Image (spheres, helix red, strand yellow):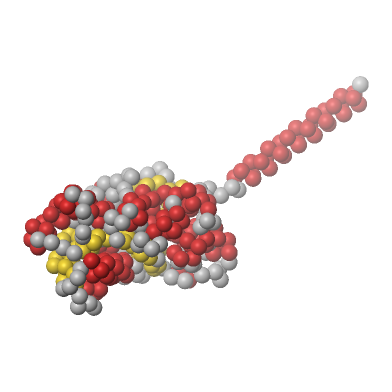
Amino acid sequence: MKSKKIIMLILIIGITFLFTGATKKNNVKKSNQKKSIEVALFVARSEGDMFFQPTIDFMRVAAKQLNMNITVFFGDYNHIKMIENVKSAVSSRVKYDFLVYINFKKTAIKAVEIAETAKIPIFIMNSGFQKDDNMGKPREKYKYWIGEMVPDDQKAGYILANILIDDAKKKKRNGKVVMAALEGNIADEASIERKKGLINAVSERNDVILKQILPANWEKESAKEKYQSLLRRYGFLDAVWCASDGMALAVYEEETGLTHGKNKVIIGGVDWTKEGLESVEKGEISATIGGHFMEGGWVAVLLYDYYNKVDFADISVAYKSDMIPVTAKNCNEVASKVSRDKWNNIDFKSFSRYHNGKEKIYDFGLEKILSKIN
């Protein structure tokens, strides 16, 4: 009997040991799982914005593949709220691994200073600094400002101006094209650079007269009011260059109301918004320049690599996102490629050097990316 009891006791101890060991193994495995990379994204506008909502959504598609969590702080067009949002994120219970900031009314200067004090890496996206901001390059004056990615806005403004002038000339029998322009916020780098491109294009041509450039602050109602002001001042215009799709569509709506649907003014914008692409397809506006809404996805790749000890700085700390024009010639093709239901077809890990070797060079060129989307 004693021997049986001893055997039973040994069995019980053995089983207990096995279960305990299995539990420990499971606990070890669970604790070794990588945590999500926490990213705070600061956007100047409001939720549902025509341009920035797709930018956010595209970034989140990339983040899902890269085990990242994106928390968005909306500024609602308020530069004070933008900075308050940064302070809130830095002091929150969530320990953010990165801050991604879209410059608005030069607030990125303060945002970088806050990040530096908090010792949280910050990445500037979409709208950066001007020379007179005296910020230098990432990692020069500020260790925790690790990089930036902004569009080639000057190129976009230049391309758009030439397309509009050429289209207006097709309708104009003789004389120079009479053009006016609506810029965004006068303190925003994106607006400043796009306007430079416009001015460069006009300076190279002798077949256009640029009457005036007015700020419309990226706002629909402001764009309508400024367009009415231009018409009162100049009587007529052949073309209107706009720094965003939203303002271009506002001008189209206003012009259509004035001409009872017989729109004659050539209009174009920047951003590749869904609404802008549809308007080009319908023949309402002539062109939209864009593709930079994808920046969020490529920034996610850079931060993912950085987090995994593959620093993008050995290639560059300052990146220019690609932008190309969409006109009636290529609108259907591009619109089908960049529709939301196709975003999950992009393998974001294929752009990562952490997954594909440090010798890989980042290639975020739009033509190549669009060719991969089926």
Point 38% across, 57% down: residue: 293
Name the residue furthest front: 173
Residue visible at 71% across and 36% down in the picture: 20
Describe residue 85's horizontal placement relative to residue 304 as left or right: left
Q: Is residue 121 left or right of residue 200?
A: right
As drawn, 196 above or below 252: below
Q: Residue at x 49, y 51 (%)?
A: 342
Q: Quadrant of residue 154?
A: bottom left
Left/right of residue 32 with respect to residue 5 in the rendered view: left
Q: Tell which of 75 and 156 is nearer to you.
A: 156
Front one among 267 and 84: 267
The answer to whether 79 is drawn above or below residue 16 in the figure is below
Res 319 → quadrant: bottom left
From this viewpoint, which residue is outermost toward the left? 233
- Whether residue 118 appears in this view of the structure is no
Residue 44, percent from left and from top: 29, 51
Residue at 44% of width from left, 51% of height from top?
Answer: 339
In screen coordinates, is 18 left or right of 163? Answer: right
Give the camera-side residue of 119 and 96. Answer: 96
**Residue 261 placement (x, y as % from top left):** 21, 50
Residue 269 image position (x, y, % from top left): 28, 60
* Whole-percent x, y for residue 83 in the image: 27, 51
Quadrant (top left, top right, bottom left, bottom right) of the N terminus: top right
